[in-house]
Image (cartoon, rainbow, N blue to C red):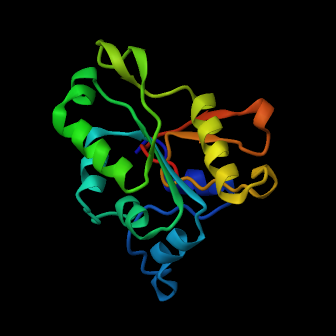
Amino acid sequence: AFVTPLTFQALSENPIHTDLFNLTEESEMGHIHLAETADLICIAPASANIIARLAHGFCDDLLTTLVSVSHAKKLLCPAMNVNMWNYSITQKNLRILGDIGIDILEPDHGSLACGYEGKGRLPAPTAIADRILELLRNTTGTSPISQTHAQTLSGKRRFDLHRPREREHHCSLGPRLL
């Protein structure tokens, strides 16, 4: 990998979680602790693959396990090729997830990374952050900013939620944000 978990750990000054079972943390059941302490789990971008795995209960990695056992609000931000987005099974999987209470922020329309044009672009970082804040506000009834802590699980995008008027967009490698 171009950027390793150690790099993220050094820069964030926080532990980085990449494995379902970490032998140094399993006396505390680290993956369960993460699920219990989360107020919101956001997956951005959410691929057709992760959407299918979540819709059908697969729990074979840290992310899918966290989503399945956590009582936190959940937000998916799908991003994929327009044909994958329009595929009937992808739409069925999204309905399944919506029916169990997972919030879906629909993708934007525009130029896609694959060269196609259509619905499938990851929503703008500000749209994702706004939805996160809305979901947290609906959970607590108050402004969530003063007590917000974002933790990345090998994330592609990270938002500084402590400065809502100056949201930062940091790029890295990897597909998921917790």
| Image quadrant assignment for residue 100 | bottom left
Q: Is residue 48 left or right of residue 79?
A: left
| Placement of the N terminus among the 4 image quadrants | top left
Q: Is residue 39 above or below residue 89?
A: below
Q: Is residue 163 left or right of residue 30?
A: right
Is 33 in front, or is 20? 33
Q: Residue at x 21, y 23 (%)?
A: 83
Location of residue 165 in the rendering, given as x and y in whole percent from the top left corner = 79, 31
Location of residue 51 in the rendering, given as x and y in whole percent from the top left corner = 30, 46
**Extreme residue in the bottom direction:** 27
Q: Residue at x 43, y 75 (%)?
A: 22
Q: Is residue 31 above or below residue 80?
A: below
| Image quadrant assignment for residue 91 | top left
Q: Residue at x 31, y 43 (%)?
A: 94
Is 23 in front, or is 103? 103
Q: Residue at x 48, y 50 (%)?
A: 154
Location of residue 119 in the rendering, given as x and y in whole percent from the top left corner = 35, 20
Location of residue 57 in the rendering, given as x and y in whole percent from the top left corner = 26, 62
Is 178 in front, or is 172? 178
Q: Is residue 46 above or below residue 65?
A: above
Is 6 in front, or is 121? 121
| Image quadrant assignment for residue 161 | top right
Q: Is residue 148 left or right of residue 80?
A: right
